[in-house]
Image (cartoon, helix red, strand yellow):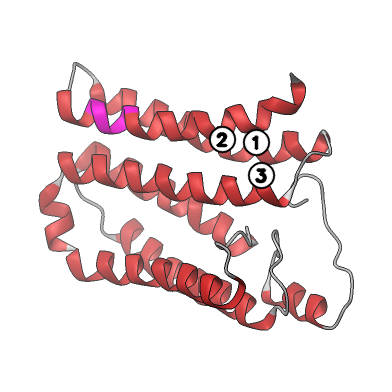
């Protein structure tokens, strides 16, 4: 049963994302608070699924790839929910949002063209951007506006997407959990990189 915990946490995030969309449509009392609680729980499942998998020594490439895919669906779901509640914010920031979506799509395109697999680098920069995205989505859900935080999220998002593309281009073979460009260079040179159970497998 213990070995199934990471998988359960990963798929729970998928369920949570759809529930957030549901609440954004029906809008019961205190629905914004409920959505933020659910978003927070989703983020915690993202943190602990990997940690638990690594401590149980079951952090396989399959699990890491599944984790990355579900992450995408989860945040897309939250974005859809935010759009349903605050369409004017998305209309006002349409250009930047499209650029971010395009940058994210480019990552997957590069990964599929080069390795025939989805991206699962789980870089440190990407983790930082996830936290910024989390905070930005909370502000949008609560206030239907975000200026400084959204702009920070936008630029950090572009920088981290560029780093991930650089990592993919540098790597000779598909590899999951590559913290930085520096680590990808070491891997390309055939050198081992130091990993930590808390941060990467």
State the SS at label 3. helix
Q: Position of residue 160 (x, y in %)?
A: 52, 69
Query: Residue at the right extreme?
Result: 191
| Magenta part of the chain | 19-23
- Measured from the top left, where is residue 177 in percent x and y? 70, 59
For the residues labelled 1 and 3, the Cα–Cα distance comes to 9 Å
Q: Which residue is mark 2?
A: 10
* Number of residues whose C-alpha sits closer than 10 Å to that of mark 1, classed few (under 14), some (14–19) or many (20 or more): many
Q: What count of labels does the image hold?
A: 3
Whole-percent x and y of residue 168? 61, 75
- Image coordinates for residue 114, horizontal then vertical, percent: 58, 78
> Circle 3: is it few (<14), some (14-19), or many (20+) Cα within 10 Å?
some
Quarter of the figure with residue 63: top right
Tell me the chief SS of the magenta region. helix
Is residue 8 in the magenta section?
no
Residue that numbered label 3 is attached to: 63
């Amino acid at each position: 049963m213990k070995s199934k915990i990471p998988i359960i946490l990963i798929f729970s995030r998928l369920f949570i994302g759809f529930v957030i969309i549901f609440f954004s449509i029906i809008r019961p009392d205190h629905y914004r608070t409920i959505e933020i609680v659910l978003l927070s729980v989703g983020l915690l499942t993202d943190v602990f699924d990997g940690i638990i998998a690594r401590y149980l020594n079951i952090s396989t490439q399959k699990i890491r790839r599944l984790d990355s895919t579900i992450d995408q669906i989860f945040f897309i779901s939250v974005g859809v929910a935010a759009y349903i509640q605050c369409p004017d914010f998305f209309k006002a920031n349409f250009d930047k949002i499209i650029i971010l979506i395009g940058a994210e799509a480019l990552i997957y395109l590069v990964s599929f063209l080069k390795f025939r697999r989805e991206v699962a680098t789980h870089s440190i920069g990407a983790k930082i951007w996830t936290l910024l995205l989390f905070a930005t989505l909370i502000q949008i859900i609560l206030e239907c506006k975000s200026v400084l935080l959204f702009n920070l999220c936008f630029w950090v998002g572009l920088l981290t997407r560029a780093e991930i593309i650089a990592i993919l281009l540098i790597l000779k073979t598909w590899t999951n959990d590559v913290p930085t460009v520096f680590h990808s260079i070491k891997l390309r040179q055939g050198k081992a990189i130091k990993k930590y159970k808390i941060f990467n497998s």
